[in-house]
Image: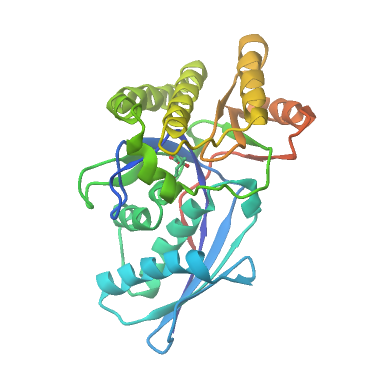
Amino acid sequence: MNSFSSLSHPNIAFIKYWGNRDNTLRIPANGSISMNLSSLETRTTVEASPEFRIDSLTLNNRRETGAVLDRVKVFFDLLREISGKPFYAHVKSENNFPLSAGIASSASAFAALAMVGSKAFGLDLTEKELSILARRGSGSASRSIPGGFVEWHAGKTNAGSFAETIAPADHWELWDCVAVVTEQPKKTGSTEGHLLAGTSPLQAARVKDAPRRLEICRNAILKRDFEALANIIELDSNMMHGVMMTSQPPLMYWSPKSLEIMLEVAKWRKTSIPAAYTLDAGPNVHVICTREYAHRVRARLEKIPGVAWVLSSGVGSGVQMLS
Ligand code: PMV
């Protein structure tokens, strides 16, 4: 029996992935940039054996069935195909953050499954190959394989669509303070949302302009230019939500509370605290700032009525094997 364990982190995108060029292979319509989140951890163990009869998944001590398990089975079908081994796998995975926080746990989950799953199936993959494999489980998981600040090159083929580090985790002490405004699961998951992106008349313009935004974001990170970073990540988040809201049917991931926080953060940046907002496919607001301002951002977010709690994290490493 082969048993392997890993530690992985979710990531927050500064330039977002929304919509695919190829839905089956999860080749995105545009490239994206993110940072891994060090305090949020996923620990995953995979055991694979020709003697197992089924794939199974235990998530936070709960045995999963249905759609969550099906997605994992599809991933192991891919590993069976690549490795040529007729193994089945038993997976145990635990997050130190609640799934209800609306943090994309699929990124850290599939980064882990790519890393330990490939080992358990006897494969020895490079970082690039792991990123390509993780992408097949969840697009954003490709960005949780490398460490620090990461760019996912959209590519046009399976082999050309992977993520790599553009700056290591210690390059810049950025912080993500997440204002959790709801603990309800979102109605439309991102896999379904990506399918609708092309129905928005704004998506083509968003995708066409992506190389420009990627360059501004990459340079802002490399030069540690917070003002430039703040402006581009807010623009990019607004553009993605513009596409979401103008899809058929429209996807309204913001809530009035999200907008209130976004306006507050923009005001802080003008008057007192360098901070910027970005939102994924949900109403919780990620507020990005440098480490020196993190405690003030956190305290201010906690004072806003309707903010249930605030989760915060610095920049994290890529996926790691645990002995
Ligand atoms: O990897 P997925 O399919 O969960 O998509 C992630 C989509 C966003 O979180 C909204 C944006 C991103 O780039 O992470």
Residue that sits furthest to the top in the current view: 271
Identify the image quadrant of residue 310.
Answer: top right
Identify the residue at image location x=43%, y=64%: 71
Identify the residue at image location x=37%, y=87%: 50
In the displayed structure, would residue 71 be above or below residue 204? below
* Number of on-image labels: 0
Q: Nearer the viewer, residue 107 or 252?
A: 252
Picture coordinates of residue 103 (x, y %)? 57, 46
Specify the quarter for ligand 1: top left
In the displayed structure, would residue 285 be above or below residue 234? below
Identify the residue at image location x=66%, y=23%: 260
Q: Nearer the viewer, residue 98 or 190?
A: 190
* Quadrant (top left, top right, bottom left, bottom right) of the N terminus: bottom left
Picture coordinates of residue 168 (x, y %)? 44, 39
Picture coordinates of residue 239 (x, y %)? 43, 26
Q: Report if residue 32 is visible in the image.
A: yes
Picture coordinates of residue 248 (x, y %)? 40, 37
Identify the residue at image location x=43%, y=56%: 111
276 sits left or right of 48 in the view: right
Identify the image quadrant of residue 232.
Answer: top left
Q: Report if residue 167 is visible in the image.
A: no
In the displayed structure, would residue 135 be above or below residue 16? below
